[in-house]
């Protein structure tokens, strides 16, 4: 399903919503009047109320306001300002236009984990660590 762009929010498919239900949800979040919503879905007031009831049931909401809040919580709605900010930031992330994605490894995940150090620790629990290279040079 294609995203539905409103004035303040963007509706994305999810929660098994139909295009009509998503349109009503975006318009409710934008503060549209009931008559504007009726016109957008080509229905009457009873049809819009039924769509709102379906929305409340699918999103687990109790009121219109709660329906909009649940839309944001369930990632069905996203603020347009946030989408704009993320798109602007992503342009600078890859200046050459190439994405540097790491290919996914095939196979079963390993259960062992690795610990890595970024810098050498010169002090251990018993004091300074000996210089292994110097000791090796003395022995050979």
Image (tube, rainbow, N blue to C red):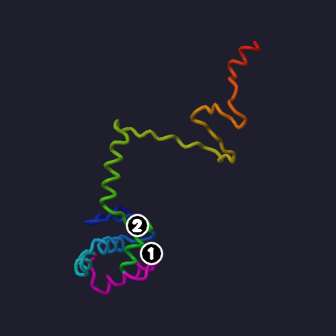
Q: Nearer the viewer, residue 45 or 11?
A: 11
* 106 shown above or below 66: above
Tag shown at residue 76: 2
Q: Is residue 48 magenta?
A: yes
Report x, y in % for residue 133.
68, 19
Q: Residue furthest bottom?
A: 46
Which picture quadrant has residue 126? top right
Q: Is residue 83 magenta?
A: no
Q: Residue furthest front?
A: 127
Q: Nearer the viewer, residue 6 or 116?
A: 116
Residue visible at 43% across and 68% down in the picture: 73
Q: Residue furthest right?
A: 139
* 99 shown above or below 56: above
The region drawn magenta spans: 41-63
- Judging by the rendered image, the residue that carries numbered circle 1 is 59
CA–CA distance in space, label 2 to label 1: 10 Å
Callout 1: 10 Å neighbours few (<14), some, many (20+)?
A: many
91 on left or right of 16: left
Of labels 2 and 1, earlier in sequence is: 1
Report x, y in % for residue 65.
36, 78
CB under 8 Å between callouts 2 and 1?
yes
Name the magenta segment's main secondary structure. helix
Q: Nearer the viewer, residue 102 or 140?
A: 140
Tag shown at residue 20: none
Q: Nearer the viewer, residue 137 or 112?
A: 137
Callout 2: 10 Å neighbours few (<14), some, many (20+)?
A: many
Which picture quadrant has residue 77? bottom left
Residue visible at 65% across and 41% down in the picture: 114
């Amino acid at each position: 399903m294609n995203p539905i762009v409103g004035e303040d929010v963007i509706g994305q498919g999810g929660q098994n919503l139909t295009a009509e239900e998503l349109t009503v949800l975006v318009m409710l979040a934008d503060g549209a009047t009931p008559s504007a919503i009726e016109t957008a879905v080509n229905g009457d007031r009873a049809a819009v109320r039924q769509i709102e009831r379906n929305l409340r049931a699918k999103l687990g909401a109790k009121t219109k306001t709660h329906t909009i809040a649940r839309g944001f919580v369930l990632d069905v709605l996203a603020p347009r300002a946030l989408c704009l900010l993320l798109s602007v930031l992503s342009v600078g992330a890859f200046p050459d236009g190439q994405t540097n994605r790491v290919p996914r490894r095939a196979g079963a995940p390993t259960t062992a984990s690795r610990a890595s150090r970024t810098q050498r620790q010169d002090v251990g629990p018993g004091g300074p660590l000996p210089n292994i290279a110097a000791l090796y040079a003395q022995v050979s």
